Image: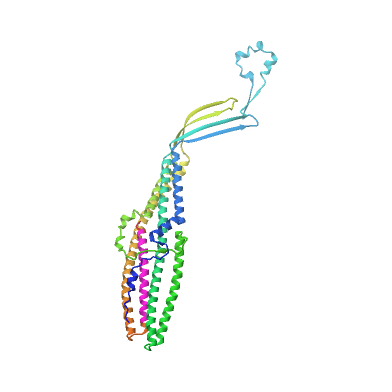
Amino acid sequence: MKKRITIISWFICCFFTVAAQQSFTLQQIKDSALHNNIAIRNAHYDIDAAHLQQKEVFTKFFPDVSGTGLWFNANKGMVQTEFTPSESLPSSLASSLPSLMSAEDIAALSNPVGVSMMKNGIIAGVHAVQPVFAGGQIVNGYKLAKLGEDVSQLQLQLSQNQVEKTAEQYFWQLASLQEKMKTIEAVDALLADIHKDVNVAVRAGLTMHNDLLQVQLRQNDIASQRLKLQNGISVVRLLLAQYCGFHDTTFAISYRSEIPSPLIARQNHQQALLGTTEYRLLDKQVEASRLQKKLAIGQNLPSVAVGAGYNYHNLLDNNHSFAMVFATVSVPISDWWAGSHAIQRRKVEQKKAQEQLEENAQLLQINMQNAWNGVEEAYQQLLLSQRSIEQAEENLRLNRNFYQAGTSKMTDLLEAQLLYQQSLDRRTDAFADYQNKLLEYRQAIGQ
């Protein structure tokens, strides 16, 4: 009895759905992973912190308002002195004292008198200082803080790329195992059909019982492979559920097996370079080194500020308040020696960052080309595996016909069956590898 094997048509149609199971597409898997991954949440926290730091630096553009207050009570006056009254009298008054005062009083004027002031008191004031010129430190500090927020955004993009890559790798790993399970089921059905035919031939005395035993051994091997695949599927599903935050591990995945042409994803690598996250981070590093050099220069320039204040005190046992305006100029003198070296160091760091940008830009383009070579190779491997299935299917059909005609051995038929199974598995692995290579290329070109 001749039967046409049509597993190849079944294999190409691999849209996977399971009744009573929630099914997720690849995009849903990646969205869930991005939503639940701790690295993504931490990256968002870094963005919030950088944004708050930017707001903090922005306040430096406005006046610095401060209030001070002091109450004190000393064990003795902070200002103490002595004076002799007679020494402070003018000569015209001293000559007339005998007629105005007694001799005892005039003698008392020659005794020293102690004076003590400011034993206790209150001092308070409110001041506002507005920087006028600070060597560009405030402006460049604000730009540097804004740059930090941009870097945090780019770091988030890198984290998202890594999470999406891991989620998609798990996805295609699970898809590959499920496709291999479909192959096991189809091969098991094929062996059951062969077992039925051989069993009939053994009973009719047309073949030896050894042929039936060989088929049964192969069926046992298929059962062992099924058990391993079931365990593998269970573990990968658990990993994917944990990565995506799924509480139900009985979910299914859905995907299509169309083979997109790699030319659809092909990009001009030199143009794509400027849009990659890695290149933009390197460019931000160059910008940061430039701003840090400006900050180092600003720290060694004079700073000018104006201010106004209102003060109060009762140091002389009476309330006194007054307002004032003032201006301050600060000129670093001895610090310029060390500061000149700091400026030179920042210049070296800027040059280093620029050279790293140029070198890594070349490496990024090399990585793009390498990723593209991987895509092309995986695509050709996939096409070869597709043709191998057709050849293995025809080989299996011929060997089955030969065995039924009595012109070949059971070992030849089982070898053909094994080759057919291996060709299906190679096609499954090649398809998953092609999808992963496409992902690596898309991330390499910044998509």
Q: How many marks?
A: 0
Q: Magenta residues, as a range?
A: 413-442
Residue 349 locus on image (x, y percent): 41, 50
The reply to whether the magenta stretch includes residue 245 is no
Please state if 45 lies on the left or on the right of 319 as rendered.
Answer: left
- Asked if 47 appears above or below 26 in the picture, the reply is above
Residue 12 locus on image (x, y percent): 33, 69
* Residue situated in front as seen by the camera: 60 or 326: 60
User: Which residue shows up at 39% across the image and 87% down it?
Assistant: 203
- Asked if 180 appears above or below 416 in the picture, the reply is above
Quadrant of the image containing the C terminus: bottom left
User: Which residue shows up at 42% across the image and 53% down it?
Assistant: 156
Q: Residue furthest bottom?
A: 205
Residue 416 locus on image (x, y percent): 35, 79
- Residue 384, picture quadrant: bottom left
Is residue 341 among the parts visible in the rendering? no
Is residue 65 among the parts visible in the rendering? yes
Please state if 248 lies on the left or on the right of 416 as rendered.
Answer: right
Please state if 240 lies on the left or on the right of 387 as rendered.
Answer: right
Q: Residue furthest front?
A: 20
Main SS, magenta region, reads helix
The reply to whether the magenta stretch includes residue 431 is yes
Image colouring: rainbow
* Residue situated in front as seen by the camera: 59 or 325: 59
- Asked if 152 appears above or below 373 in the picture, the reply is above
Residue 274 locus on image (x, y percent): 34, 53
Please state if 18 lies on the left or on the right of 98 as rendered.
Answer: left
Q: Residue furthest right?
A: 104
* Residue situated in front as seen by the camera: 88 or 43: 43
Quadrant of the image containing the N terminus: bottom left
